[in-house]
Image (tube, rainbow, N blue to C red):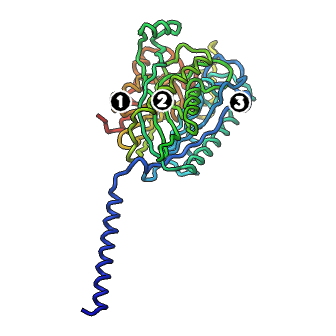
Amino acid sequence: MDYSVQMQTISSAISSAIWRFCALAAIMLLSAPVHAGDWRAGTASIKITPERPMWMSGYASRDRPAEGTSIDLWAKVLLLEDPQGTRAALITLDLVGIDRDFSQRVCTELREKFSLERRQVALCVSHTHSGPVVGSNLMAMYSLDETQRQLIVDYTADLQTKIVNLVGRAIAGLAPAKIAWGTGHSTIAVNRRNNKEPDVPRLREQGALVGPVDYDVPVLSVRRPTGELTAIVFGYACHATVLPFFDWSGDYPGFAQIELERAHPGTLALFFAGCGADQNPLPRRSVDLAREYGRSLAQSVDATLAGVMAPVEGALDLQYSECPLALADLPTRDDLVTQSQGTDKYVAQRARLLLKQIDAGQPLSPIYPYPIQHWRLGGDLQWVLLGGEVVVDYSLRLKRELGRERTWVAAYANDVMAYIPSLRVLKEGGYEGGGAMVYYGLPTVWSPAVEESIVTGVHALAPRRHP
């Protein structure tokens, strides 16, 4: 064979072998399993303690603005990115609540600036009762002069800017991460509908507390590939109502975050509230108790971090919907006029707000667009996020139906528009069953379809049941 022909043959064979090798390598790369180390995460935080004395939210009995600061309030962001590039922004806020309009404005700006769709953003408040009024949340509870109203408007606008900028910082800080999850245990919560507050110390000592509770403490850890802890997300189903004073404070969730960040320098701790609308930390009403509950909850989180946690592997599956949640029979305009002239100042304030709405050409709606969010993190962990002050029955039911070991349920997410009773609590009545509706400004109580409507909405987003 001619030498040049021989060299061409050899060259062709080598080229063919190289091509086959590259093709095989590409196939192997594309079919390789996704590992936790392929994720990325970024964090950011900013202080949101009001700089001027303004009205505090949470208690109707407060009759003047805040007078000082016990511990600062914070907004925090954990930005997750899965191996396919899908992103999710968890935003936690040391606040009593946010309204629908505020949530929509924040999410609209996040979509415009960072291409984050509504399903990719979750806004979770801790429900501390020592935070400021935000937007129109619980507006029927307060008697405010124009100065205080303007302070609320200014604070709300500034908060929106801070949150959007915070998400941008978290995106800019994205770095490789390993994510894992587990569930701890804490017995701080007491069902306040079934146990009288003065009796709780004795009942606890006797092991005689009654009523449904959710003692689970969900924990998500974010570490760098080297193992360095950078973020802790944790939750608990219990009201943040230890402190009734006139000082800004994150209450026991704020103290828990401080404890965790102190124990793990350089780590950001983020808290979300579970379905604790009918749960209280008891006894209460002292800073020492708030600090002790926070320390106890942090210890539960640390115990989970020190144990075996399940790695998050796979991808993010993010869903969001709004359920048309039906109200009971609406009042007429004449009903509202009568209420506005009554002796109950909170009923009268609500009636005046609703009359103003009607006179502005906005009739009362028989439904409310209730937010439901479902995040699946990898193949196992699923997270249900519900709006409003949700009673514990929902958490217990959804865990039972979706798989207790792999399901987390958050409340006070995206829009805190009212208490959300189960059918049982609605029938029983009381504050959580309907009495609290007046403070939120909704015209009446929920219809008996409230529980099934929400649970059906959750199942529509999470059709697969885990064993």
Q: Residue 317's x, y, as percent?
A: 40, 45
Crowdedness of circle 1 by 10 Å Cα count: few (<14), some, many (20+)?
A: some
- Residue under numbered circle 2: 301
Q: Residue 292's x, y, as percent?
A: 56, 20
Q: Residue at x 36, y 26 (%)?
A: 397
- Residue under numbered circle 3: 149
Residue 288 vs residue 81, the one in the foreground? 288
Label 2 amino acid? Val
Locate the N terminus by quadrant: bottom left
Crowdedness of circle 3 by 10 Å Cα count: few (<14), some, many (20+)?
A: some
Q: Residue 404 carries which label?
A: 1
Whether residues under marks 2 and 1 lie with C-beta atoms below 8 angstroms apart, the answer is no
Q: Alpha-carbon distance for marks 1 and 3?
A: 44 Å
Q: Alpha-carbon distance for marks 2 and 1?
A: 18 Å
Q: To which quarter of the image does residue 345 belong? A: top right
Q: To which quarter of the image does residue 306 belong? A: top left
Q: What SS does tag 3 mark?
A: helix
Q: Does the rendering let one see residue 327? A: no
